[in-house]
Image: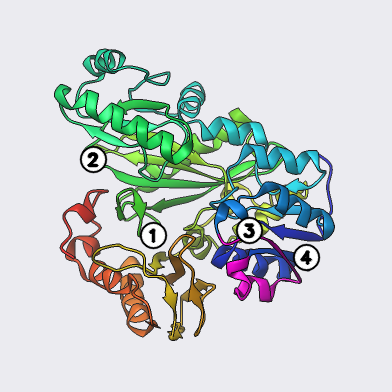
Amino acid sequence: MSKREIRKILIANRGEIAIRIIWTCKEMGIKTVAVHSEADRDALHVRYADEAVCIGGAPSAQSYLNIPSIISAAEITNVDAIHPGYGFLAESATFAKICGDCNIKFIGPRPEVIAMMGDKVEARRTMKAAGVPILPGSPEPIESTAEAAKLAESIGYPLIIKAAAGGGGRGMRIVRKHEELHGQLETAQAEALAAFKNGSVYIERYIERPRHIEIQVLADEHGNCIHLGERECSIQRRHQKLLEEAPSPVLTAEQRAEMGAVAVNACKQIGYSNAGTFEFLLDEDGSFYFMEMNTRVQVEHPVTEMVTLADIVRNQIRIASGENLQYTQEDVQIVGHSIECRINAEDPVKFTPSPGRITAFNIPGGPGVRVDTAAYPGYVVPPYYDSMIAKLIVHARTRELAINRMQRALDMMVVEGIKTTIPLHKKIMADKRFQAGDFSTKFMEEFEL
């Protein structure tokens, strides 16, 4: 793959991730173009970019998901590449293909790889062929209760039904006995159809108390691939992550090397390039199983950056330029411990959205503290998009010190005018089980708010 000069990038996103991409572009001397909805005219990413283009109304379908408007903005501003960030069109194979057809470099993997990993049934099949451990389950989408019941006999209960075309907990149902199967299958199919316009679901064995571990990979367009260690993502509510940390408090160096090697080998098998994340379930006996692959930069990428000093966005741009990876696996060293808390504009008990005007906004500083945010005093949090308003990240020499540092940072973070999840994160940091690293994805179900 020949080198391609990238001088100007359109960021097909908003909020903190758009600003995060602008940070790196400024350091690399690359011009940026922000796109925004009518609701985001006063957003910080619009102010910080070199150019800005309004692409439609407030609803995402009219703006950030509006492919013709985004491509038009890219063409009139004469950009070389588009960075999709995460969410919105980041994992749209259609969008990636259209970018290529318009001679605009999509900063991400090839469209066919995005499509392959976006179909969860196809992803399972592909990963199994690549030697990645997967849970026993259906090789094809499940169409009927009779088919599901036959499969359930072979893999046993409990089992989980998942949407083939999506994630985030939508179209997902746990079945613990045969009598529940029919109703839960119909519910999962209906939810999947409503959320993803695709009612296909599949079934796999359900692990009761797993940990959610993910491996960050970087792969260039010349066949080189490395991993940057793991992230612990088990603290989540209804399959939505609340906080993440790196490294995991339970993974051994041997397990890290094994999981990393599996992920790197799979990347090479499927011809993957750019940044990506393999998500695994880690059983209590140390076994791990492929869950899905995210073909984009992750919300929680800062914790990996903090413990490895790798700029993941810079690597994405360099890879898209046709350059070789700057590191070998031996160059990757994990130093200290990092934790990220997602600060959402939500009621911390009811988890209902809390849009509105931020009347006071003070972010903490000091040693080892990083805040990724697009909020500011007077900013109006719109009701149309994801509720996350900031990511509070800390780094310290040990996990204990990182927890202490996060507690200090949370105490010093001031957000007034709306409700946020800051009080929830304070309680989690003070929890003895969390402090001991003794938790699973069930943590929030057993947590007293």
Measure how far apart labels 4 and 3 are at the Cα level. Answer: 13 Å
**Which color scheme is applied?**
rainbow
Label 2 crowd (10 A; few <14 / some 14-19 / many >=20): few
Residue at 23 percent across and 23 percent down: it is 182
Does the image show residue 423? yes
Q: CA distance from mark 2 to mark 4?
A: 46 Å
- Tag 3 or tag 2, which sits nearer the N-term? 2
Do the numbered discs 3 and 1 sit on residues whose CB atoms are within 8 Å? no
Tell me where residue 409 appears, x and y as whole percent.
Answer: 37, 79
Tell which tag, 2 or 3, sits nearer the viewer: 3
The residue carrying mark 1 is 245
Q: How far apart are the two marked residues, 2 and 3, measured between alpha carbons?
A: 34 Å
Residues at circles 4 and 3 in contact by the CB criterion of under 8 Å:
no
Quadrant assignment for the N terminus: top right
Packing grade of label 4 (10 A; few <14, some 14-19, many >=20) is some
Magenta span of residues: 38-58
Side of 4 where 167 appears, left or right: left
User: Compared to 182, does 2 lie above or below?
Assistant: below
Label 2 sits on residue = 284
Q: Nearer the viewer, residue 368 or 31?
A: 31
Residue at which label 3 appears: 313
